[in-house]
Every structure is written in C-alpha cells, then in structure tokens.
Image: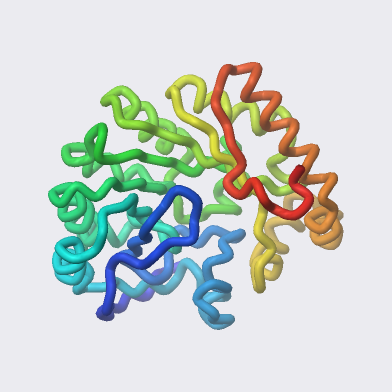
Amino acid sequence: MSTKYSTGVCRTALSVSKLPGLRYSLNPYVGCEHGCRYCYVPDILGGEKLAFKWGSTVKAKKNIAEVLAREVMKKPKGIVGVSTICDPYQPIEAKLMLTRRCIEILAQHDFPVSIQTKSKLVLRDADMIVPEKFDVGVTISTMDLKLVSRLEPGASLPDERVQVLEEFSSRGVETWLFLGPIIPGINDSEESMTQVIDVAARTRSKIIYDRLNPKRWVMDRLAPVLTKERPDLAERLSDFMRDGSVWRQICLRVESICRELGIKCEAAFPNWPNTR
C-alpha cells in the first residue's frame, strides 16, 4: 500500500499528556505508516475515514521544531513522550528529520525525553540519545514474523527492534520493552510472551505490558487478521475483553514469567477495570 504524504502546521509542540510518567507529549506527525491493525489512535483523533486509511496517509507538522524552540523557553521542564499518537521514527522521518530536530532542541534545554518506537531508524540518532537525558522504549508484541507482518505491516522486524534495545542498553541508556497489546488467543501464550520477555532479560530492559484497547474501529480493522489466525476468535474476542478474569490471568502469567527471568515489569495502566 502506497502512502499519501502532506504537510501542515501546528500551534503547539508540547501538549500536556495524561499518560503515566509523562508531563508532555510531542507528535511530529499525524498518522503512522506502520499501519498497526490494533491501533486505537484514530478514535482519539476522531475520524472514521482516517481509521480505515490508517497507515496510508501521513501529515507532517513542518513547523514543529520552530514552535518547540519557542515553547521550551517558556514551559516548565518535564518528561516529554516522543511520540504518543504516532511513531516518531516511521519511514518519512528518514527524509524529514522532524523528530531528530525536536529531540535535539529538547536535550539542549534539559527536557528529559522518553522515546517509544517500533523502528530501527531510531539508531540513526544514537549520537544524541545519551544516558541521563533519554530513555528508549521499543514495542514488541510478538517475535512471530508471520503474525507481525499481519498486525504491524509497516514496522521494523522484531529482530531489528531487538537490536535497538541491545545498542542503547550497551550505551548505558535506560531501555524498556513494551509488550502489547496482548490479545487473547493471538499472542498471550506462555511461549509467545516468554520469547518477548527473554529479550528484555538479555537487554536489561524493564517490561511494560498492556491489553488490547477495543476503541471504535479497532475491531473492524483487526477482524481480518483474527480470522486468518483464529477463525473462531473474531466473534469471541469482544467477550474476552469484557471478561476481567481473562485479563487478570494474562497479568499473572506475564508477572510470573518476569519473576522467573528476574525482570522488572508493570502494567501500563494498572487501574484498568477488573485488572486486579
């Protein structure tokens, strides 16, 4: 699928974040070429049209670095999440370098930066991503190449994401592995999760895990993948997601594996209904 690119302008670069541990979010792009089937961001942005074109349209905020340069002089310091509603290192970043310009400004003004990505492109910026100022999180939902190609068609391969954790960990940068979304019947087996958590053990990374967030249009986009993987699952998954006991069992399984491997772990949103 080809991607349609466009540009726009933004009025603010640093938005107040409601995510745990972050004061601000910074998103250089609207839309994401990775096209992950489970992504709930289209619901946040409020667009059904966008939901079904997710992965094929991207708008770059061409003035974001200039806006950021002004805001860092005025706003209180705090941790900046890069990014929260797009991948900051999606393929177009290789050309436009908006993320690189922004994290350089943030570092120069002593704003701590927390990067989350599914892309090996983040290694390009290893020269400026240094300990004390940055942490780097990499999302790995599964090590199964076939499943990854269906769930996250535009993202870097799992082994390439492992290389990102290995490289930054070896440089002394704090690293973490985002295991999610965990989808019942798809990537919640002990074998599947152990393969991912073992990566965290080898790279001295903390595990943050999360469930599937069934926002509007998520199930519509995910259903074709579920049908290929488990023909019986598409209709049953909504029931699984409403059943708190299913998620509690998954939490216990993740935490048991982490204990066995000596890895710190935490739920991304520990106050999900019926989580505990």
Image quadrant where one finds the C terminus:
top right
Q: Nearer the viewer, residue 30 or 109?
A: 109
Residue 185 locus on image (x, y percent): 78, 45
Residue 84 locus on image (x, y percent): 43, 59
Q: Nearer the viewer, residue 198 or 174?
A: 174
**Left or right of 276 in this view: 55:** left
Residue at 53 percent of width and 53 percent of height: 152
**Left or right of 88 in this view: 126:** left
Residue 61 locus on image (x, y percent): 27, 73
Judging from the image, the colouring scheme is: rainbow
Q: Is residue 195 above or below residue 134?
A: above
Identify the residue at the far front of this view: 76
Instruction: Please tell me in which quadrant of the rendered image residue 30 appears.
Output: bottom left
Q: Nearer the viewer, residue 196 or 116?
A: 116
Residue at 62 percent of width and 24 percent of height: 258
Residue 2 locus on image (x, y percent): 41, 69
